Amino acid sequence: MLVLVGLALALALQQWTEREALLRQLGRHNHDSAQWLVHLLEVDAERSADLAPEHALPDVPSVAGVGPPRRLSRTASARRDERLAAAFEQTGLQRLQLLDGGGRVLWQRSAAAAPSWAPAGYARLLALRAEPGVATLQRTSGTEAAWQLRLEVGTAEAVDALWQGLLLSASALVLPTGAALLAWRRWRRRLRRAIGALEVHAEALPDAHPAVAQPPELPELRSLAHRIDRLVERQRRAFDAQAGQLQALHRQLHIDALTGLPRRREFVARLGQALTGEQAPPRLALLLLRVRDLQGMNRRIGHLATDHVLQAVAHTLASYSQRADGCFAGRMNGADFALVLPAGGVALETADALVRGLQGPLAAVDAACGIAVGAVELCSPMPLQQALARADEALAHAEAQCAFAAAGPQEA
């Protein structure tokens, strides 16, 4: 919009400047034409002088005011009128007047405005009217006032010339400017699209896995896009590394590194959910398993073999989790493990099966080892601490028996 206003002001200033110059030129032309026509009239008067009294007419000016007073004949008057009429027709004057010393019109001729192909509104706005040309004819008698010749040329051709100049100037300014504006708008749209894509890509940088930006259309922005892509790749690698670290930390906090079973906190939280949650089964079984004399086993067979024993126990418990939905196991501490079964009436039976399944392999590794399993039946909802207390009681009952034993809570 500002560009169009600037172009309009430039064209208006150009038109005003050309109008003023044309007015001065027309004024000089009017003055020179009046002087030239007066000179012709003086020459004609000199040639047609007739001093006969019977044909005497009003005084005629002498040439340049020099010579005795003369009288114009009827032939001289007619030649004057013919000269004025010929000059009016041949030179395209708008108005021509011959005035006596008192301002009375002796001869005049005017013509309608010549047709112009410029718009009428433009001509009225232009108001092109030059100063009329004025020249003086000296009378032969020194006592009479001189005559005056006034003329004006037509301005239709001047208006057409200015209008044509305006059209040419507008074409020379508006067309290239319009083409430049269209090219700029197109480039601006491309720039906005490219910047918009980069903004979307930049806003996605905080995401864990931002997408790689497509190369922008504008070559000027491709370098920036490549830099953003490199930043995205570095950020992606950093996010992946952080995710790996978080997973490792999660496993360290919640998963036992040796056995792969959940640690005590994770297991207890899941047990509490099974006892009091909305999806809790009506009955379940809780088993606590303890490897007897773990420190003595370390001394007898070594830490590595003891670790293999613990891994074998964990593998046996984990096999139950893989076979039944809702069944889960955990490592409570160094020698203690736990198992939850989402069914009732199977606690003691499962405990006996565990003892029988582990007795042979463990005795083959360490003849002095032992396993104690305490099993309890639980009904939900039940407080967590109550359930753990009952399981501890059953485990203590089992430890009071032989090396490989399973027992429920002691009857009161």
Image (cartoon, rainbow, N blue to C red):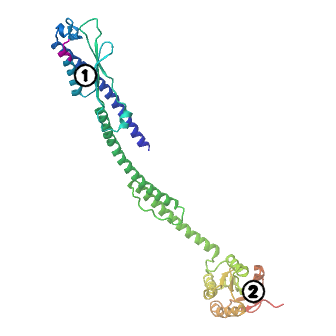
Gap between marks 2 and 1, in whole Å?
A: 130 Å
- Residue at image position (43%, 62%) is 214
Which range is magenta?
Answer: 72-77
Q: Position of residue 44 (x, y in %)?
A: 18, 16
Dominant SS in magenta: helix
The one nearer the camera, 376 or 357, is 376
Q: Quadrant of residue 11?
A: top left
Mark 2, residue position: 378
Is 73 inside the magenta-drawn segment?
Answer: yes
Instruction: Tell me the mark number nearer the camera, choosing from 2 and 1.
Output: 1
Residue in the image at 41% along x and 59% along y: 216
Give the image location of residue 212, x and y in percent.
46, 64
- Residue extending farthest to the left is 47
Horizontally, is 293 left or right of 130 in the view?
right
Q: Position of residue 162 (x, y in %)?
A: 31, 35
The residue under label 1 is 33
Q: Nearer the viewer, residue 194 or 247?
A: 194
Q: Amino acid at mark 2?
A: Leu
Q: Quadrant of the C terminus?
A: bottom right
